[in-house]
Image: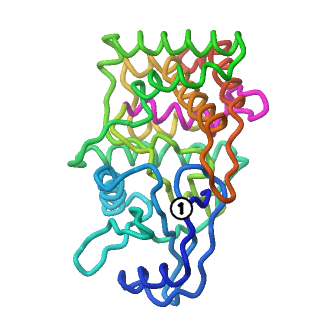
Amino acid sequence: MAVFTPVTEEQAAELMSQLGLGTLTELRGIEGGIENTNYFATTDLGDYVLTLFERLNHEQLPFYLFLMKHLAEKGIPVPNPAANRDGDILHTVCDKPAAVVNRLEGKSQLAPEAIHCAAVGDMLARMHLAGEDYNRSQPNLRGLTWWNETVPVVLPYLDEAQAGLLQSELAYQNHIAQSAAYQALPKGPVHADLFRDNVMFDGEKLTGFFDFYFAGVDTWLFDLSVCLNDWCINLPTGEHHAERAQAMLNAYQAVRPLRAAERQLLPAMLRAGALRFWISRLWDFHLPRDAAMLKPHDPTHFERVLRARLASPLKLWA
């Protein structure tokens, strides 16, 4: 991720020692995202990721960290937060809340084929079921409430056509959220940000999901829709790739079949997923924070995805 808070080797070495993770041999800042400060930390015992949280606070973080530990103990391949001698998994570095997790094996599959999409669908369904009995609750902090608060902030940066689309889609999503069908959607802990760069593969084998720091309790269908909008589209146009989308949905449903309300609202939730990331990318692009190695994502990508969802709703049960 972007490096907002510089960490010295001495500071990192002290934390790794406190966690019983060995002697630090290398510390390297990670480029790529825009939320937290992340470093690869290598010791004589293994490879780890050190995260300093720039927006989430000490009260919010236990939900994410204990969710990862809960899922790991259920056999879902996710990073497992390291505890100190007192059993604490939330630490402090540079006066910021911090965590250390094991580094997953493999690499991101940025040009997925149907077999990769099927693997994601299968594991996503298993993750949803594994999290069903998780005993902590926190809403999706980038859900509808945040959309309603943030759209007025980004509207001045848009042209008339973009502003019209953003406002009309937000009104539609507020309407959907009040519907009986939406209220019937099953909910639980969701990743909410499971893009191609947040999954690891070793060849065709899925080796892990990571970066759970947008997780929250939301509809499982929204989580699935976020995945479909990234893994199963043609990136230049935002249009769905039918073979990959069908592979992901078939694999997901082999583990957890979608309910009638979910099949009904899949097109609406695909639009919701596109809207969420269009809003957040507009916010990050036009109202950036200072950070070394910060590279905001292009917000027009998810404008294209939303327009594609409107023009050609995904049809899988015709």
The correct choice, above or below, for 169 with respect to 298 in the image is: above
- Give left or right: position of 41 versus 233: left
- Secondary structure under badge 1? strand
Tag 1 residue: 207
Colouring scheme applied when the structure was drawn: rainbow
Q: In front here: 141 or 250? A: 141
Residue type for callout 1: Thr
Q: In front here: 286 or 263? A: 286
Q: Residue at x 68, y 19 (%)?
A: 158
Which class describes the residues within 10 Å of circle 1: few (<14), some (14-19), or many (20+)? some
The percent position of residue 166, horizontal first and vertical second, equals 59, 16
Q: Quadrant of residue 214?
A: top left
The percent position of residue 88, horizontal first and vertical second, equals 27, 70
Magenta stretch, residue numbers: 219-243
The correct choice, above or below, for 170 with respect to 191 in the image is: above
User: Most extreme residue toward the right, as rendered?
Assistant: 236
The percent position of residue 61, horizontal first and vertical second, equals 34, 54
Quadrant location of the C terminus in the rendered image: top right
The correct choice, above or below, for 216 with respect to 5 in the image is: above
- Give left or right: position of 111 versus 77: right
Quadrant location of the N terminus in the rendered image: bottom right
Q: Quadrant of residue 297?
A: top right
What is the count of numbered marks?
Answer: 1
- Give left or right: position of 242 versus 207: right
The percent position of residue 225, horizontal first and vertical second, equals 52, 31
Is 172 magenta? The answer is: no
Q: In front here: 105 or 66? A: 66
Is 223 magenta? The answer is: yes
